[in-house]
Amino acid sequence: MTHPTPYYRRLAATPEIEIVLDGTSLRVPADAPVLPSLMALGIEAWSGRNRQAQPLCLMGACFQCTAVVDGRPGQRLCRTPARQGMSIGSEQADG
Ligand code: FES
């Protein structure tokens, strides 16, 4: 697949590692923020707190991309670098 922007083309050229998203193994670029890598794979929804919300800022300000990462809730996927074996999963909704 040819990616539309230089950023995604650079991601595609980075060595890949394996992460687990909602129980599904995925290969993503090492050390790149998780969210743009998921978007490059066409994944736009996961079991984060704001399941209906879409990430807005991609820079850590809106908190629309939070999920549980390796057991820690409230992690912003746009600010979290991908690490080998990282597990991303559900987060309970507020209220
Ligand atoms: S997309 Fe806004 S904080 Fe992650």
Image: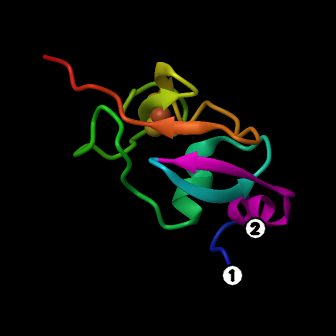
Q: How many marks?
A: 2
The quadrant of the image that shows the C terminus is top left
Residue at screen point 44% across, 47% down: 22
Tell me: residue 76, above or below residue 9.
above
Left or right side of 32 for 24: left
* Location of residue 16 in the rendering, given as x and y in whole percent from the top left corner: 80, 57
Query: Mark 1: which amino acid?
Result: Thr
Outermost residue toward the front in this view: 23
Pointer 2 residue Cβ closer than 8 Å to ligand 1: no
* Location of residue 83 in the rendering, given as x and y in whole percent from the top left corner: 74, 38
Outermost residue toward the bottom in this view: 1
Tell me: residue 24, above or below residue 82.
below
Q: Which residue is mark 2?
A: 9
* 40 falls in the magenta region: no
Tell me: residue 6, above or below residue 85.
below
Query: Could you say whether the residue bearing mark 1 is in a helix, strand or loop?
Result: loop
* Location of residue 53 in the rendering, given as x and y in whole percent from the top left corner: 26, 43
Residue 77 bears which disc, if any?
none
Residue 84 placement: quadrant: top right
Query: Could you say whether the residue bearing mark 2 is in a helix, strand or loop?
Result: helix
Left or right side of 16 for 66: left
* Location of residue 80 in the rendering, given as x and y in whole percent from the top left corner: 63, 31
Query: Mark 2: which amino acid?
Result: Arg
Q: Which residue is mark 1?
A: 2
The quadrant of the image that shows the N terminus is bottom right
Residue at screen point 80% across, 61% down: 10
The residue range painted magenta reads 6-21
Instruction: Check contact, mark 1 vs mark 2: CB within 8 A.
Output: yes
